[in-house]
Amino acid sequence: MPYIPHDEEETAAMLAAIGVDRIDALFDEIPQHLQTFPQGVPEGLSEMALAREFEERAAAQPSLRSFAGAGAYAHHIPAVVPELIGRGEFYSAYTPYQAEASQGTLQVIFEFQTYIARLTGMEVANASLYDGASALFEACLMALRLRPQQRSILVPRYLLPHWREVLDSLLPLQDVRCIELDADPQRGTVRLPAQAPADAAALIIPQINALGLLEDVDALQRWATDQGLLSIAVVQPLSLALLREPGGWGESGADIVVGEAQALGIPLNGGGPYCGLFACRRDMVRQMPGRLVARTRDAAGRVGYCLTLQAREQHIRRGQATSNVCTNQGLMVTAATIALASLGAHGLREAAVRSHRQARSLLAALLDLKAVRRPWDGPFFNEFVVRFPISAVQLRDALLADGILAGVPLAELGLGEDGDLLIAVTERVSDEDIDDYRAAVGRILEQ
Amino acid sequence: MESIFDLDHHREPVTADLDIPAALCRQHPLDLPNPSELEVLRHYTQLSQRNFAIDTHFYPLGSCTMKYNPRIAHRLANLPGFADIHPATPAQAQQGLLHLLWDLQNGLAELTQMAAVSLTPAAGAQGELAGVAMIRAYHHARGDFQRRRMLIPSAAHGTNPASARMAGFTVTELPTRADGDLELAALERELGPDVAGIMLTNPSTLGVFERQIETIAERVHQAGALLYYDGANFNAILGRVAPGRMGFDVMHLNLHKTFATPHGGGGPGSGAVAAAAHLEPFLPLPRVQREQDGRWRWLGRADRPQSIGRLNAYAGQIGVLLRAQAYLRRLGRAGVKRVSSYAVLNANYLLKELQRVGYRAAFPQRRASHEFLLTVEDLHRQTGVRALDVAKRLLDFGIYAPTIYFPQLVPECLLIEPTETESKATLDRFVAVMAQIRQEALEQPELLKGAPQRLKLGRLDEAWAARHLQLVQER
């Protein structure tokens, strides 16, 4: 019996102790007609047969060099990361409610909170939320708790569309609406109105926007401050090795910062599990969603860690909690923390610089091709849009045969024109990869 | 233990020619340490050793189903063919993955006897939010905008009222009878044209099966409301009783409980939602669909315009879903039924044995499900020892603490769930330890009040933590 240790003798002894003659008798409080056997579930497999099935499925998909981004990136993962997070003591541990038996997990989270606070330039960070998009949703709700008279959030047109969809699914349930801010068609960045709508609580500022472009974050932060709005920064943490941290935007800095931490040691995994980061000003901490770890001590004065401000959370506050969230991305937090530690300040900057440099090289190589141009030409970190004279979907599909995932067609995100392809480059991209990409595109365009 | 921020070595700064305006760039160098790789490995290995975990300790943790996490599932989910897939990969280049997710959708639909499944919710709480949002969307689609109230038993998980509120409902709590079943008269009193639905866990959080479930379903449906099933306790009935047959309309499953995916120190969870046919159009997106030509693709908004929409940037915790599918495939038809059989056997055995050594069941007249509630109110009255003290003392014996003070309606309670993957020998040792702790409580209550005594740290001061609020390492 897979994973069940009992032999017949033990089972019999246990039944005798209970005072019944068979296991089915233990279900005697459940009406008999409700007890049905799941005929539609297939027979079980041996571990060998199971492995074969999964290995065949895994082999069914081509191995691709990824130039796709739009919120998920193929960065290098240091070997120590999977090695350590596969340790049973991390992998199979529970939520650290019993602090004395969970110091490993708790200290990892405390270090994660510190890393995120330092990267973003904010005072406090939490133990993570499901992913970047759900962290943004929670940030919007937090902004509304801080501004209870307001009912809307200002959302730039070039926020990642999948993230926008999450807001559109969940915010209206609480009668909150998104008000979209136009983009400057030439620049591809936010165009600010003279006046914020009267019922707006916060402005979302994505630094890097959905076109890969960098926004003038100081101007956006200043406008938010002038209009009496809270600001919610959306960041890509690896880019913060180069870009100005949100805590330093404008004069006052951002109020809340969220982002997707997948780029830090977490595999692409087809879209999850990822890790939503969440940071804010210290005076807002009681309105924060999600778990928080604090340093503390025992009776002998020895330093340890425990969950704190749990009265914000659903298991204490129930219907009045700041959020229904009951998990954090524990193991992914562990991965991100260990990746940050292995890279260090030095390695992070190296990865960021190389991503940026290789992105510039690929862009230059592509712009060299006839009839290929860049529709928005502002500064970028590692992701940019190129407009091809043919459909980007067609081009992307054609390059699969070369083992290249060429990017994300903007049309699939509901943005841009048919020929627009959003291309992301990480430090893993070699000069040879760039040559191969260019050659493959050149070949398609010549056909 | 030292912090990673204490392990730093000087590294020459990386100079770079950036094509980014200086105003957008970081003005000060990153204030992060540069430990050596060996230091990193040692630091986190040593931290891991300061955890209890299923791989090292018994976890009789009620409502959490801390069962063994099979290693084969971990290995298979990490195959490069899955781990390296970018979420924007076109469907034709991820057929193997979509096939497995499709199989999982079908397996879960079969086990729950529901019409369709969406795998996207990132955790149980997000599954709940999806489910109640679907109930709202269902009523709205019928032009019924009056139903703003959700009924929830007072003993429910805290996520239930929190999720209902996030979906825009007000919450009315329903009382429980002394025998653990729902107070039917209260339900009938509350039902009306303003009630959208009821959220139930069955077996309930009290560790007993709600025997009136069919009557409840009938009354709720007669009143035009729907039933939500919280799948936290599905391990008790896996392969044996299906929520769809009990009359539930929509539900979530905690894959990190029933389907053996790891808790990972607090996540990632995964909270698939399953729905009866009338709620299928509202399931969250994306979902996997099999086409006429036998190929798989993601369903989107254009396919399901009534969907409550997207909950996360992508399709959910796919790495977790693969582990759940590996587990389900390994167990198969006979294996899933054995799970509930032995989970319930272990719980009832443990309950009997703990009663034998002097502990009191909160519902002694009832059969335990996969978990059961004890109360140490008697010990508390006699000795001042509380459930918290018993829990902390268990840590000294290398056993993780049961869930305590939940559900709140039973004073000084311990909610105990052994799961099917623990052997009789482990359970017998637990009983022996619990007997000793009871003896200690009667003879040396101070020993328990000062527990844990044998770990690296004594009881940590949560009040101090909240007062000083040191949430990040100072520079």
Image (cartoon, helix red, strand yellow):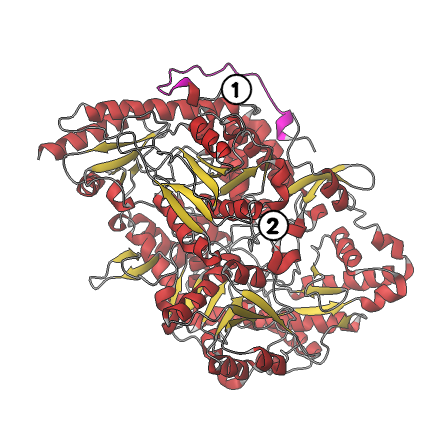
Residue on which disc 1 sits: B29
Q: Quadrant of residue A186?
A: top left
Residue on which disc 2 sits: A93
Could you say where residue A129 lies in the image, as x and y percent from the top left? Answer: 52, 46
- Asked if marks 2 and 1 touch (Cβ < 8 Å), the reply is no
As drawn, is A324 to the left or to the right of A60?
Answer: right
- Which numbered tag is attached to residue B389? none
In the image, residue B334 lies in the stretch drawn in magenta = no
Could you say where residue A140 lies in the image, as x and y percent from the top left? Answer: 49, 46
As drawn, is A80 to the left or to the right of A166?
Answer: right
Residue bounds of the magenta highlight: B4-22
Could you say where residue B191 lies in the image, as x and y percent from the top left? Answer: 54, 78
Toward the right, the furthest residue is B443
- In this rendering, is residue A433 above or below B356? above
Q: Quadrant of residue A124?
A: top right
- Say if labels 2 and 1 share a chain: no
Q: Residues within 10 Å of mark 1 (few under 14, many from 20)?
A: few
Residue placed at 81% from the left, 50% from the top?
B451
Q: Amino acid at mark 2?
A: Ala
The reply to whether residue A146 is visible in this rendering is yes
Quadrant of the image for the C terminus of chain A? top left
As drawn, is B373 to the left or to the right of A320?
Answer: right
Could you say where residue A156 lies in the image, as x and y percent from the top left? Answer: 37, 39
Toward the left, the furthest residue is A447
Q: Is A414 or B205 nearer to us in this picture?
A: A414
Closer to the eye: label 2 or 1: 1
Residue placed at 53% from the left, 47% from the top?
A144
- In this rendering, is residue A6 above or below A85? below
Secondary element under disc 2, as helix, strand or loop, is loop
Q: Amino acid at mark 1?
A: Pro
